[in-house]
Amino acid sequence: MASTDARLLALEALVQSQQTTIEALTGKGGTIETLSGNAVDVDIAWLVICGAMVFFMQAGFSMLEAGAVGAKNVINILFKNVMDGSVAALCFWLLGYGFAYGPTVGGFIGNGNFGIEDIHNGAGEEEGASDGWEGWFFQWAFAGTAATIVSGSVAERTKLEAYLVYSAVVTSFIYPVVVHWGWGEGWLSAWGAMGGDDPKPLLKGDERSNGMIDFAGSGVVHMVGGFSGLVGAIIIGPRHNRFDVEGKPMAIKGHNTTMMALGTVILWFGWYGFNCGSTLGLSGGLGNIAGKVAVTTTIAAAAGCLTATAIARSLVGSYDISVSLNGVLAGLVGITANCSVVNPWHALLVGMVAAFVYFGASRLLLRLQVDDPLDAFAIHGACGAWGLLATGIFCTDENVQYAGYPNTNDACGRGEQFAVQLIGVVAIAAWSASMSGLTFLVIKATLGVRVSEQVEAEGLDRSEHGMQAYSSELLQHTEHGSQQEYRAAGSNKIQPHKDNSLAAPPPAASSPSACRPTPSRSAAELSVRLVVLFFLCWGRGRKESEMRGGWELKWARVSPSLCLSVSLSVCLSLSVQPEAGKRSSLDNGWTGEMA
């Protein structure tokens, strides 16, 4: 009996000990709560750091754009970049964030949380979650980026007040609507499309579909900025002396290549906050996704740079640093949508094709006499569209699940995802172009959008800001140097432009630029090399995918033709090989034209 009682007492003591342990783990302030709180704190810190990196991209845009414009417009372009961040902060706080992430109205626009009224001290305490401050901060940095892209397209001839009005409109309304479509509860979203407890992602309306996959914003951010900039450039018109009397492009060189290179490297650095930060956290396995995104982002940027360099050398005959820098940005924009759902070899192809898309789009705009001083559309608009389409071409169902998308299906394998991405491209392009066009036309009819020809000739620094970035002696030396280049090219006469302004004629055949090395390879040979490299990479990747149970063979056969059609059409249709004695890259005006 005594032995039994002793055993019961021991058992009671053991149970009480276990209860104490469980309470210590699960109670308020216990180990589990502490660990959960630590995970939330880590996620918050991650977003704050990445948001700061994305905001630091404003410094990259500032350096890049300041180096690409003339010395007499440096202060103006720097001022616009500072204003973009400031205007975006207030507009996105008061209106934009509510339109983007408020409860959906028919899948079109958000309606709520204006002035971030739902974010306050202790807002997430009951659920053990974040209060939400860092979410607004991170998204504001993205809004500022979308606005800044436009400044490059309309540089060196736009009224400052007109640009500030447009910046307010794009960050208050145009951009937030697209954010709601793709990242909120909008009709394109992969994260709860149409709201409610029963999401309806495009196309099937149930778990068989994913909705549009745009992980970090090739479409949501870059297409909005790129297509808005394109429309602005068309409505405002080209800079004086940008095209000669025959409509051929004339060189307006950037004044500082060092600043352009520095700006591009800063942007590349900030892009890791842009893409990796879009995991929105590190806990729960998100750190692995962030690591993968860093790898694919790096490979695409490098591939874009090297491919653009090869294009310039093969089709123009020189190693043009501006084209190489633009190739970096083209690869980064192209990979932004799909960085989490593709493999490294996919990233290589995405970056390579992005370089061709950029080059072809840039040349096409020159043929159409559209003056985009920073090539913003070619890089952000065209390559942003390519990034969305490349997601549908190269995504695998395994990678989509690994990236944390909510539905389990085979949408990538059976090709449905490409159709969804195509719909997203058309919708974003149409919305951005139409709304931006309306905005610029209203501003043109009221405030006016363009400075006078005299102000443009003197430079916006003096007229808009009452100061100059450089001394008068240095500015005169810069202008005198440009005139000497034209005289050395045999241009002793100035021809009137079709709008009665003065335009220097193209260099004669005896000019130094005509003595540049001629292209060493034809466009056809370059295309053949691209095709061979593409099939080598694709064959290897397809084999790996089959071994891992990835792509369906039917879609695996279709995807190469889609990718090749983009690259070959751009290369052969838009990239014209200059003949000996004709204009080189310096003379046709796209050297130093950055975005």
Image (tube, rainbow, N blue to C red):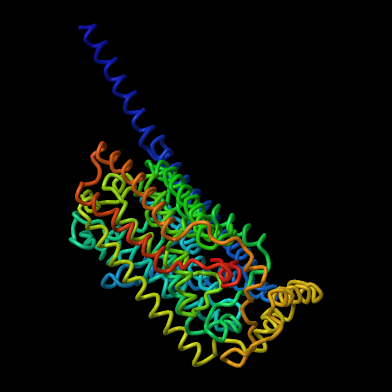
Residue 16: x percent and y percent? Answer: 31, 24
Number of callouts: 0
Residue at the farthest right position: 473
The one nearer the camera, 368 or 190, is: 368
The one nearer the camera, 441 or 156, is: 156
Residue 70: x percent and y percent? Answer: 66, 73
Q: Is residue 233 above or below residue 93?
A: below
- Quadrant of the image containing the N terminus: top left
Quarter occupied by residue 384: bottom left
Residue 190: x percent and y percent? Answer: 29, 58
One can see residue 160 in this view: no
Q: Is residue 492 above or below residue 218?
A: below
User: In the picture provided, is 39 more to the left or to the right than 324?
Assistant: left
Q: Residue at x 61, y 65 (%)?
A: 62
Residue 207: x percent and y percent? Answer: 19, 54
Quarter occupied by residue 57: bottom right
Quarter occupied by residue 219: bottom left
Q: Is residue 207 above or below residue 254?
A: above
One can see residue 307 in this view: yes
Q: Is residue 452 above or below residue 483?
A: below
The one nearer the camera, 488 or 224, is: 488
The one nearer the camera, 503 or 105, is: 503
User: In the picture provided, is 235 more to the left or to the right than 542?
Assistant: right
